[in-house]
Amino acid sequence: MRTLDAEITERKGPALYPTCEVCGAKEGIHKAVVGPKQDDDYHYAKRYELACGHTLHDPDAKFEAGVVTLFQLQHPEYMEIEGENAGN
């Protein structure tokens, strides 16, 4: 059985359970703050608020749009969209 974590790793996107650089916890992403859409295939994640309370900054991380959509469907309360298309 495939997991979302394996799917994201396979697509070369960030895992849902990154290791916190501050405390070493792997409790998962509480909220991903995603920048405006750059093209048809990718969104850029500016930072991840982790469940341990620390923030992981990764301005170069790429989510494939379908993975972000799947994450939003599972946890819509955790996603914030910034930029011109916010709220659409």
Image: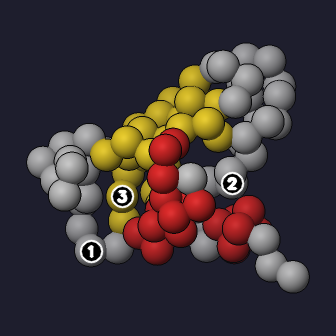
Which image quadrant for residue 10?
bottom right
Q: Which image quadrant for residue 23?
A: top right
**Relative to 22, residue 63 above or below:** below
Q: Amino acid at mark 3?
A: His
The amino acid type, in three-letter code, at marker 1 is: Asp
- Identify the residue at image location x=25%, y=58%: 37
State if disc 3 and disc 1 touch (CB < 8 Å).
no
Q: CA distance from mark 1 to mark 3?
A: 9 Å
The image position of residue 39, as x and y in percent, is 24, 68
Question: Residue at the spot x=73%, y=23% of the render?
Answer: 52
Give residue 58's mark: none
How packed mark 1 is, by other alpha carbons closer than 10 Å (few <14, some 14-19, many 20 or more), is: few
Indicate the secondary structure of the residue bearing disc 3. strand
Give residue 16's position: percent from left, percent from top. 68, 51
Location of mark 3 (residue): 43
Mark 2 / mark 3, whichever is N-terminal = 2
The residue that mark 1 highlights is 40
Instruction: Say which residue appears at 51% left-offset and 42% top-offset.
Output: 78
Q: Of residues 79 and 64, which is closer to you in this image?
A: 79
> Residue under circle 2?
15
